[in-house]
Image: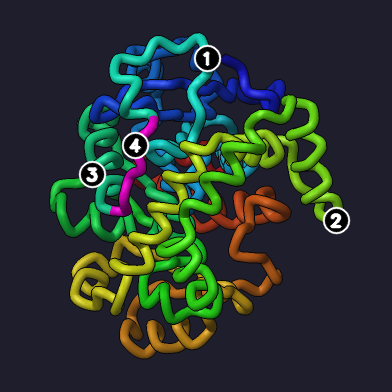
Amino acid sequence: MESAQSKSFTACTSHFIHVNGIPTKVIKVDGQSTGIGDGGVRGCIERYTSNVIFLIIPGNPGIPDFYELFMETIFKASNCQVPVWAIGHAGHVEPPKDLTINNKERMLEAYSLDDQIQHKAAFISEHIPADKKLILIGHSIGCYIILELMKAIPTLPVLKALQLFPAIERMWGTPNGSVMAPLTIYCRWIAFTATYLANYLSDYVKWRLVNWYFRNSKVPKCAIQGALNVFNPYVMNSAVYMASTEMKEVLDLDVENVKNHLSKLLFYYGTSDGWCPLDFYHNAKALFPDGDLRLCKHGMEHAFVLESSELMGDLVWNWMKEEIAVNNNKLDVLN
């Protein structure tokens, strides 16, 4: 299933696989993938020469389509040498109608933050070849998932873990969290009911509504396509339920865990982020004076995939290219 965002220099492909029995969307940009299905994901990467894979763990909603332009930018910057994957969150993407699903009831479940952590651990265990190194890219709550994975699985083959606009502490107490927490915890039924009714709209009307919502933004087509998933009531229910568990579980920063993995972490904070206020950055700088903590100088929003995918992709490659070249022992990647 070819993505609408595919370019001549990439083969951006979507796969629905089963992870822990849950239909899961994986998007890959690696320039050569053709397989679709449970065997297609791992089969392609085993033919690839790079021993590094970028793997994106998204925010919430965890719809990997939002990240396609970001992924393509990284892949193009690597001279089409380093594959880039993104995995969707369990229950956050509506599978195609012709997909054969083993356990259809798993589609309708709502998955907690802990469920999503276990989901990503299973994906890495089952689909990342043992001889590959990972550069994990977390966005928002995806950063928390990565930190929990690194704590739970000491043998995780992580070369680097990038924390982009990290939602890793005191979520309920943030400006956005103080508004969203009561809504996600006590009013989830409203979101479900609204999307249940909206789901009866035609695909064209849904598309028009999404375009109207983003009318004042230069949003890439992949983000428009991704946003259409929220018209599915079960997707919305799972995203809101996950958000409610985030508010309850993402409390004080796990300082010990960060210290234990500090050499592999790079944090990138926004200057006006309602999920990660500026004082979180200053506190982290004081806690981890030897850490790699960076403050955005480009005015990017927390949801950078909406208008800053290419800028963020170029930054990520520039941060990582030397480390990848050393790891791959391929200096030509730098050219």
Q: Which residue is mark 1?
A: 97
What amino acid is at disc 2?
A: Asn
Q: Secondary structure at mark 2?
A: loop
Between residue 274 and residue 232, name the one nearer to us.
232
Q: Which residue is mark 3?
A: 118
Residue 149 makes an appearance in the image: yes
Between circles 3 and 4, the one closer to the viewer is 4
x then y, percent, for residue 145: 32, 55
Q: Which residue is mark 2?
A: 216
Residue at 44% x, 83% y is: 280
Considering only order in the chain, which callout, 4 or 2, is on the residue closer to the N terminus?
4
Image quarter of the N terminus: top right
Q: Is residue 315 magenta?
A: no
Could you tell me how far apart the alpha carbons at marks 2 and 4 are, in whole angstroms? 34 Å
x then y, percent, for residue 39: 33, 12
Could you tell me how far apart the alpha carbons at marks 4 and 1 are, in whole angstroms? 18 Å
Considering only order in the chain, which callout, 4 or 3, is on the residue closer to the N terminus?
4
What amino acid is at disc 3?
A: Gln
Q: Which residues are magenta?
A: 108-113
Is mark 3 in CB contact (under 8 Å) with mark 2? no
Is mark 3 in CB contact (under 8 Å) with mark 1? no
Viewed as shown, does residue 300 lie left or right of 169? right
Q: Which residue is mark 4?
A: 109
Residue at 41% x, 75% y is: 172
Q: Is residue 144 above or below residue 299?
A: above
Between circles 3 and 1, the one closer to the viewer is 1
Q: Is residue 311 above or below residue 127?
A: below
